[in-house]
Amino acid sequence: MNAGPWELLGLRPGADERSVKRAYAALLKKTRPEDDPEAYQRLRETYEHALALARRHAAQAEPVAEAAGAVMVEAAVVETAVVEAAVVEAAVVETAVVETVMVEAAGAAASDVQAAEVPVPPAMPDEMALRRQAWSDAAPLWQDFLEHWDADRRLSLDTIAGGGSPLSLLGHEALEVMAARSCASDDCDPALREAVVEYFRWHEDHRHMERIDGDTVHHVLDRYRADLAFLDLYARYDANVLSALVANEPPRFALRLADSSFVGGMRQAVRQVRWQAPELLGFRLDRTVFEWWEQRVLAPRITLQLIVLCVVAGLVLFGISAGVTGGSLDGWGWWRFLVCEAAALAAGAWVTFKAPPMAGALLRCKVEHVDPLLFGDRYLLGRYGWLAPFTVVTLAMFVPEPGAVLYAATAVGMAACAAAALFGASPALTMQGYALVAVSGLMLSGFMHEVFPGYHVVAFVGVVVCLQTLLLSHGMRQHDLGMAGPRLLAVRIGWLLGSVALFLAPYYMALPAGAALLLWLWVLGGVIIGSFSARLLIVLPAWFVLWLLAAAKRDLLAVQPETRVVALESLLLALAICMAQSLWRNRRAH
């Protein structure tokens, strides 16, 4: 009663479908339905169970050989057809026909078949009783599997549903139904649901389960797809997008909608859920929360990144106009500055709300033409080519008392360099980085007036913007240019030693006429090669103390250095402190 189908058929476990049919044909000659109906029914169930197991093993196994030849294939087809004819007609055909079919299955040539009297159909066992017995046999096995699976997640369903299972075909069917109903419950472990679905291969073919319990298996497959889609969301999107989607209720205020990176990620997530994984709305996500975010992120929206971009565009426009006309911020210059900024903001709003096709065209242009310039290794000159004209323009700004042409050219050139610097560093700049660049450009423009007196304020802002982008993108620049290793460390240490010498030089010797120019080039070189990961809580106090000591020493000098030299020395001191602490932190980290 507890023997498996393989033992009852006299086969080894895992036999193929052809061997099962041959063994069944051989046993069918000894067990005739008219002689022993119960034995015939048991043989029939054993055959169907073994046949199902053989087909499942064949579907799961990798193919190991090709067909032996057309002759063997034809023989197998004939043999299979004969055996299946014997299986179907065994209960109703004549005894002589059954014997003839068995002879054909064994490979012997059949000759004249004599008709015989049709026997009286045997009495079949009660089907309901067999099904009740099958459920009684399968229930303890499934319950035992659940208890052991909670303790050992590596436990396989082969222990109860594989080749060594004592269940009949009806018992195996009952086991599948029990597994489906367990997986359909809300408290089912997603890992168990995934293991059951993939073992029984319902995600590939569940037609047999549809005939038994279609609603349950459809519910299980929906949950299974929702589990996989949820894992895919976790792999694709950041924590901010996921936490917003899995919330239980919509937020009252959504300040994150001002962040274009968050809006872009949320827009992709809601489109994926809506068109690729709608099962998530039924089992994993709250539909009200999802529709709240969907309505807002798919609508045109002004973000902080757009505002910063418009402000930068307004600065560039103002720089170009001021450089051409040679104006300043006095009088109507402020009005011109405000008009340029308002025009840039209005253009950004118009593109966002009134010209969606243009916005789409700009996005496609960015993907097809701009992104290769930003991320492709072939276009390093496009990302860092602005350094050469930036250096030339800053050197030109050391000319005292510039004329109208130089005054306008430096303003226009520095505005263009600032725009190119922001473009090249955009992969490394976050929303906070753009804000820091904008604020520092406006705040430190007065400091740059001490270094480059007599030039336009747009040129001062452009210098600060370029320096700030270099500081914030040092990691990307080192990766792109291959600046790493002991050689770079030696260069940085040499720069630090040179900075100490240049900083102390005014207190022990008279500086030559080109000292300010040398100091500026040294500062610019340090910004390009430096690594700046220092803590401001250490840098600012150290700079303040050292600068006070230097100022006290400078007051004792008979000949005071010029103003731009003092300003450049303060900048050099800050950079040297930052680089020294960064090198120390990197050494401790390694």
Image: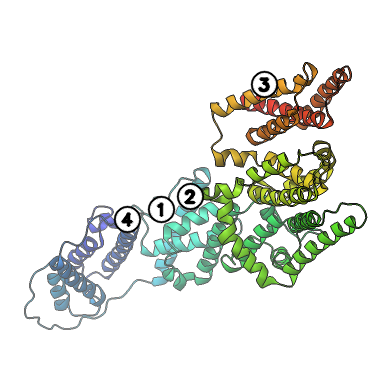
- The dot on residue 497 is 3
Check disc 3 and report its element: helix, strand or loop: helix
Q: Nearer the viewer's eye, disc 4 or disc 2?
A: 4
Q: Nearer the viewer's eye, disc 4 or disc 1?
A: 4
Report the front residue among 539 and 277: 539
Disc 2 to disc 1: CB gap under 8 Å: yes
What distance separates the C-alpha of mark 3 from that of mark 2? 74 Å
Going from N to C along the chain, the mark reached first, 4 or 3, is 4
Q: Residue under circle 1? A: 160
Query: Could you tell me residue 332's position as x and y percent?
Result: 91, 58
Check disc 2 and report its element: helix, strand or loop: helix
Q: Amino acid at mark 2?
A: Asp
The quadrant holding residue 316 is bottom right
Disc 4 to disc 1: CB gap under 8 Å: no
**158 sits to left or right of 482:** left
Report the front residue among 387 and 562: 562
Query: Could you tell me residue 137's position as x and y percent?
Result: 42, 58
Q: Residue under circle 4? A: 61
Relative to 7, residue 27 above or below: below
What distance separates the C-alpha of mark 2 from that of mark 1? 9 Å
Check disc 4 and report its element: helix, strand or loop: loop
- The dot on residue 144 is 2
Check disc 1 and report its element: helix, strand or loop: helix
Q: Characterize the local packing of mark 4: few (<14), some (14-19) or many (20 or more) Cα atoms within 10 angstroms.
A: few
**219 sits to left or right of 40:** right
Going from N to C along the chain, the mark reached first, 4 or 2, is 4
**482 sits to left or right of 156:** right
What distance separates the C-alpha of mark 1 from that of mark 3? 75 Å
